[in-house]
Image (cartoon, helix red, strand yellow):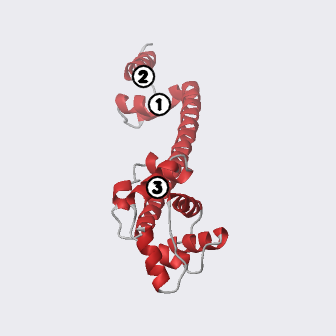
């Protein structure tokens, strides 16, 4: 393949342009670390590595060498972007390797990374909401305990008032946070005290 590309470049009066796993590793690292397009990642690599003029434009459209691509992705197994894609199970190396060109392959990789970032953002939002809910639950529990303490102090006059208003014993117990039997016993005792001479 290198020989054919070298001959093709020579026939057009160009310097031969090759892409290997080392090149791919650096391009993929740049792509995963920056929010750039695939073409920008290739152009950046051409400039920083001093590749021949037009290297990026030519190599980006080369057919994917599956061995080189797999080698590059294997060597990037500890890259944070790749770890994130593996965490959310969106990294599909076989699909990437089936691409017709490096441009298409790395575009798929970038889309998979975008999906992983979206899932991570959703997880972070859910974690934030969970902590907010947990804090509110603690606050609600404290307020309920305070309400029960306050009700336990002055529930008896309120129970009598509610009974005079025709509220059932069950509903009075629910409103006051007391057991039905406890409220019923208290109200019956109060009625006996009023009736007895």
Q: Residue furthest bottom?
A: 12
Report the Cα–Cα distance between label 1 and label 2: 9 Å
Q: Mark 3 points at which residue?
A: 116
Residue 138 is drawn in which quadrant?
Answer: top right
Q: Is mark 3 on a helix, strand or loop?
A: helix
Let me know if residue 166 appears in the view.
yes
Quadrant location of the C terminus? top left
Report the Cα–Cα distance between label 3 and label 1: 51 Å
Q: Name the residue under label 2.
A: 183
Residue beneath the point at 35% across and 66% down: 99
Q: Which x, y percent locates residue 144? A: 54, 33
Between 90 and 28, which is closer to the camera in this rendering? 28
**Image height of 112 relative to 42, above or below:** above
Residue beneath the point at 38% across and 55% down: 93
Q: Say which label, 2 or 3, has the lower sequence index.
A: 3
Residue beneath the point at 46% across and 29% down: 177
Dot 1 and dot 2 residues touching (CB under 8 Å): yes
- Which of the two discs, 2 and 3, sits closer to the camera? 3
Between 130 and 191, which is closer to the camera in this rendering? 130
Between 7 and 117, which is closer to the camera in this rendering? 7
Q: Which x, y percent locates residue 5? A: 44, 74
Q: Name the residue under label 1.
A: 176
Q: Which x, y percent locates residue 27? A: 55, 64
Let me know if residue 103 appears in the view.
no
Between 69 and 120, which is closer to the camera in this rendering? 69
Instruction: Answer with left or right where residue 165 lies relative to residue 131.
Output: left
Q: Say which label, 3 or 1, has the lower sequence index.
A: 3
- Which of the two discs, 3 and 1, sits closer to the camera? 3
- Which of the two discs, 1 and 2, sits closer to the camera? 1
Q: Residue furthest top?
A: 197
């Amino acid at each position: 393949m290198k020989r054919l590309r070298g001959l093709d470049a020579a026939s057009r009066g160009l310097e031969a342009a090759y892409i290997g796993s080392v090149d791919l590793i650096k391009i993929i690292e740049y792509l995963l670390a920056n929010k750039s397009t695939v073409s920008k990642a290739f152009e950046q690599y051409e400039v920083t590595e001093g590749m021949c003029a037009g290297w990026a434009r030519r190599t980006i459209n080369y057919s994917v060498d599956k061995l080189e691509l797999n080698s590059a992705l294997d060597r990037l197994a500890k890259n944070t972007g790749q770890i994130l894609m593996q965490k959310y199970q969106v990294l599909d190396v076989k699909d990437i390797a089936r691409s017709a060109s490096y441009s298409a392959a790395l575009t798929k990789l970038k889309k998979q990374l975008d999906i992983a970032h979206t899932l991570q953002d959703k997880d972070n939002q859910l974690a934030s909401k969970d902590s907010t809910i947990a804090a509110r639950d603690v606050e609600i529990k404290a307020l309920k305990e305070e309400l029960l303490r306050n009700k336990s102090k002055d529930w008896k006059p309120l129970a009598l008032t509610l009974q005079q208003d025709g509220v059932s014993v069950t509903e009075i117990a629910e409103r006051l946070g007391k057991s039905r039997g406890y409220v019923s016993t208290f109200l019956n005792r109060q009625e006996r005290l009023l009736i007895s001479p």
